[in-house]
Amino acid sequence: MAIKLGDLLVQNGLITKHQLKEALHAQTIFGGKLGTNLVELGYVNEMDLAKLLSTQLGIACVEASAFDKVDKDVLKLVPKKLVAKHRVMPIEADEKTIRLAMSDPTNFPSIDEISFATGMRVEPMVAPEILLVYAIERYYDVPRSVRYIRASGMAQNLAETDTASSAAMPRLSGDQEQLSTVGEAQIDIGPSTEEMVTEGFPIHAVVTQLIRSNNVNDVLEIIRAFVSQDFNYTAVFLLSGETAVGATHKGGKLPIDMFQEYQFPINSSQLLFQVFNSREPFHGIPTISGVDHWYFTELGFPMDRPTLVIPVVTDDRVVCMILASENKKGELLDMLDMYNLLVKKLGMAFEMLVLKKQILDLSALDT
C-alpha cells in the first residue's frame, strides 16, 4: 500500500494538518525531505519519525548508537560515490548480506544499484536523514550541505545572536547547496515581449514572470530584478519557521553564497521582527542594533537612509522578507501601493510552487 509520510504522521497524532502544511511550504522553499523539514521546524523528533516508519513498514530501525563505531571493512563494501548519491550508510555485514541504513527503505532502485555494485544482498534499515548525513560526513568525508549545518548549529547560533553587535556572526563551513546562485548572465528576466517596457520592470511583467516560475530561485531572481529598479540595496530573507535565512541580495558587498550561509532567529532582529509580527511594511529610517547592525554591516548597507521592509505572506504565515534601502525614484510612501501589490502576487507565487510540487510528486514514501 502506498504510504504518504505526512498523512501517516497526522493519522498517528504526531503532527497536525496545519503543521504538515507548514512543512510542505518549507520543503518547497528549502528542499530536502518532508521529514527533515518537520524535524527542523521542531514538529517531530527524528528518532520518533524513524520508529514510526519502522513499525509501518515492518523494517528494523537503526538506533543512533549504531553510527558510533562502524567497522572499516563494512565501510569499504559500499563505494563513496554510491553512499553520497543515495545518502545511505552501511552498518553491518556478513558474508552475503549488508545491512544498509536508509531514510527511505522503499527506494528499490537505490537498493538494486548498491546490491549490483557490491554483489551482496541488501537488507534495508530505517534511519533519520539527519543522522545519515552526519555519519556519511564522518566516515566517508562527504561534506554536509548548508541546510544540515544550519540544523546542527542552531543552538550555538541562538546563543550568539542574543549578544550580536557590530561584529559579524560566525560563518559556516562546508560545501554549499545554494538557494539562489544564478549569475547575472543566466537570469532570463529581461524584456522579452511587448509588455516589458524599455524603462523599468512593470508590475504586470512581474506577474507574467511569476506565472512562469518553476522554483524558488526563479521567484528570488524576479524579486531582486524588480526591487533593484527602485533601490540601490536589496536583501531577501527566507523564513524557516521563525528563523531568517539569507537568500539573495543586490548592491551589497558580501558574496551571495556567503550571505546564504547566514541565519538567525527572527526575534533577534528588532527591525525584521516588528514586520514579522505585524505583517505590515516598515518604511523610514530604521533603528539599528544587535543582529540588525550585524547584517547591515556585513552587507555594507547604509544605516541612515530611508528603508523599506515588507513581508511576503502565504497561507497566513510569513515566508519571505524583502529589505530595500536608498530608493532611486521618489518617496517611499509613494511606492507602498505598488509594493503591497507585489508581495500579494509573490505570496500567490510561493503557494503556486507548493501546489505544483504536490501535483508533480508521485512518490509513495517521502521521508
Image (cartoon, helix red, strand yellow):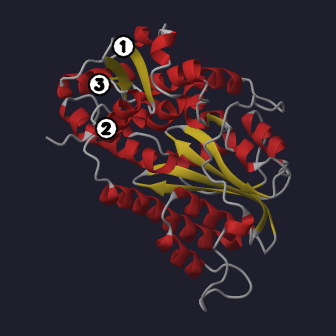
| Residue 266 against residue 78 in the figure, above or below | below
Measure the alpha-carbon separation of dots 2 and 3: 15 Å
Element at label 1: strand
In the rendered image, residue 65, in percent from the top left (x then y), is placed at: 42, 8
Q: Is residue 83 visible to the viewer in this orientation of the structure?
A: yes
Q: In which quarter of the image is residue 164?
A: top right
For this rendering, which residue is in front, 14 or 221? 221
* Residue type at the position of mark 1: Ala
Q: Is residue 367 visible to the viewer in this orientation of the structure?
A: no
Extreme residue toward the left, this view: 1
* Residue type at the position of mark 2: Asn
Mark number for residue 93? Answer: 1
Side (left or right) of 24 relative to 160? left
At 41% from the left and 32% from the top, the residue drawn is 117
How dense is the environment of label 2, judged by Cα within 10 Å: few (below 14), some, or many (20 and up)?
some
How dense is the environment of label 1, judged by Cα within 10 Å: few (below 14), some, or many (20 and up)?
some
Element at label 3: strand
How dense is the environment of label 3, judged by Cα within 10 Å: few (below 14), some, or many (20 and up)?
some
Nearest to N terminus: mark 2 or mark 1:
1
In the rendered image, residue 185, in percent from the top left (x then y), is placed at: 73, 68
Q: Name the residue under label 2.
A: 107
* Residue type at the position of mark 3: Arg
Mark number for residue 121? Answer: 3
For this rendering, which residue is in front, 239 or 6? 6
